[in-house]
Image: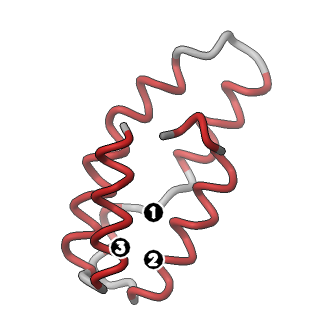
Amino acid sequence: MTTAVQAVNAALAAGDVAAACSAISRWRGPMNDWADRFPPGPRMVRMHQALEGSIEAMTCASTSIDTLRAQWSNLQRKIGPDGE
């Protein structure tokens, strides 16, 4: 997952919305599997809620790079260092 996070960070740093959206999409798949590994309970629910509320592929391409950066930062705070 660290590689996926690095890809998102690199695309955001470069200001490339299309690459950032693509990297976020690739990051989301493994994250759902990762969240399922938590024992049932509040933490698992919190992780799934963060992922469900994360940047949507349908609207990502029409989002400004600054908004994507803010959303990504907020998502990383919600998930924490375990999400890398």
Q: Quadrant of residue 57?
A: bottom left
Q: Earlier in the sequence, mark 1 or mark 2?
A: 1
Residue at coordinates 53% horizontally, 45% vertically from top-left?
Answer: 51
Residue type at the position of mark 1: Ile
Contact between labelled residues 2 and 3, with CB atoms less than 8 Å apart: no
Q: Residue at x 45, y 63 (%)?
A: 55
* Relative depth, front residue between 12 and 50: 12
Residue located at (54% from left, 26% from top): 35
Mark 3 Cα shell of 10 Å, populated few (<14), some (14-19), many (≥20): few
Quarter where residue 65 is shown? bottom left
Task: Work out whether 31 lies above or below 73.
Answer: above
Q: CA distance from mark 1 to mark 2?
A: 8 Å
For residue 55, the mark is 1
In the image shown, does 5 or 27 lie closer to the viewer? 5
Residue 59 percent coordinates (x, y)? 35, 73
Q: Residue 75: x percent and y percent?
A: 59, 57
Q: Nearer the viewer, residue 77 or 21?
A: 77
Helix, strand, or loop for circle 3?
Answer: helix
Which SS class for mark 2?
A: helix
Q: Amino acid at mark 2?
A: Leu
Q: Residues within 10 Å of mark 2 (few under 14, many from 20)?
A: many
Q: Give the spatial CA distance, label 3 vs label 2.
A: 11 Å
Viewer-nearest of discs 3 and 1: 1
- Amino acid type, label 3: Thr
Q: Which residue is mark 2?
A: 68
- Where does the image place residue 41, in percent across and percent down from the top left? 76, 17
At which x and y percent is residue 73?
58, 67
Residues at marks 3 and 1 touching, judged by CB atoms closer than 8 Å: yes
Q: Is residue 15 left or right of residue 44?
A: left
